[in-house]
Amino acid sequence: MKQKVVVFSQIDTEVLERLKQRYHVMVINPKEGDVNMQIREQVADADGMIGAGRVLNQNNLETAKQLKIISSVSVGYDNYDLSYLNQAKVWLSHTPHVLTNATADLAFTLLMSAARQVPYLDQWTKTGQWLRTVGQAQFGQEIFGQNLGIIGLGNIGAAIARRGFHGFNMNILYHGRHEKLELAQALNARFCGLDELLVQSDFVVVAVDLNAHTKHLIDAKAFEKMKPHAVFVNVSRGAVVDEQALIQALEQKQIFAAGLDVYDKEPLQDSGLFQLPNVVTLPHIGSATEVTRKKMAELAYQNLVKALDGDQPQYLVNPEFK
Ligand code: 8YV
């Protein structure tokens, strides 16, 4: 009898077809009613799950009696209750590395777009407001040779730092739980406290995981420390930032601009950010290129298959049910 796999979000169609050949597949469909109720019902006799972007915890997993693995098509895993999964002895795998460059590219896209007011001036031009040579109101911020502060020098943070160092001759500052000596030497990067990074940086980029220590790490006090011409970029998780404090900092021009790909609540709807000309808002597209999403789906497929074949997947978040 085929093992059962529950697909809890949209995934690559080619990978979905391969799953259907190998397993009994049930796809959760939000159009068919309450998603948590569907998950509770379908996981009762499921052996594996695959997908992303949905909260999975005791509330919707406690009916699962034989679940071995949740294969997340993501690098972040803050939406999974890891302590519950460990207690229930359910593996959680994820897809690091394959999305690093796409996400770092997007971070720099946001950095440059926000620094030079690209979305705002694009609309300004297209609505016929360009009547004479541009003035102070259309000026942006210098990028080349400026101070780039990276909060979280993990894989993605390091890739962002490389773009700044090698591509724009930027001075790299970084903050995190510990120094990264070899990487710092290669990028001439300086480890510093968060306050010093905020005070010294012309560009502040958040690339940390979301956890109890980083929730609202960037709050009103943090924005007060930043330079008035500073640009703030977030490609990590929305909840790392106090979003209302960010809106206030932008409204009061405590900082020059922000570039955002993630938000407290997603999808972003009816937000105070929508009225602000000095923020670039993108819909969580960090890893959203055709090539990268295919690589993520393939890696998630391999993680799932390995676990259901009785082997240990390559990228387990909780290898020992810590
Ligand atoms: C995912 C991401 O697309 O990998 C991550 O952690 O944030 C994105 O690449 C997102 O998690 C899917 O909801």
Image (spheres, rainbow, N blue to C red):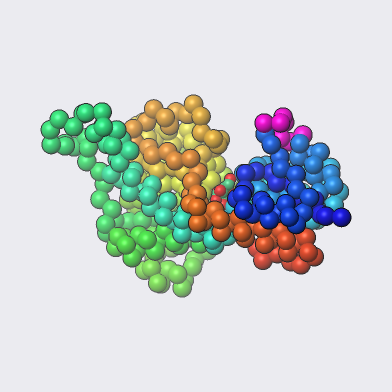
Q: Picture quarter containing residue 93?
A: bottom right
Residue drawn at x 49%, y 26% as measured from the top left: 270
- From this viewpoint, is residue 215 visible? yes
Quadrant in which the N terminus is drawn: bottom right
Q: Picture quarter containing residue 265?
A: top right
Q: Is residue 302 above or below residue 88?
A: below
Residue drawn at x 54%, y 35% as measured from the top left: 267
Residue 44 drawn at (x, y percent): 84, 44
Instruction: Please tell me whether the stretch drawn in magenta is mainly helix, strand or loop.
Output: helix
Residue 65 drawn at (x, y percent): 86, 48
- 155 vs 229, left or right, is right
Residue 148 drawn at (x, y percent): 36, 56
Residue drawn at x 51%, y 62% as measured from the top left: 155
Q: Picture quarter containing residue 229?
A: top left
Residue drawn at x 71%, y 42% as measured from the top left: 27
Nearest the eye: 220 or 26: 26
Nearest the eye: 75 or 123: 123
Residue 97 drawn at (x, y percent): 54, 62
> Which residue sits furthest left?
132
Nearest the eye: 200 or 171: 171
Q: How many marks?
A: 0
Quadrant in which the C terminus is drawn: bottom right
Nearest the eye: 69 or 255: 69
- Residue 136 located within the stretch drawn in magenta: no
Numbered range of the magenta stretch: 31-37
- From this viewpoint, is residue 254 visible? no
Q: Is residue 310 above or below residue 12?
A: below
- 134 vs 61, left or right, is left
- 116 vs 7, left or right, is left
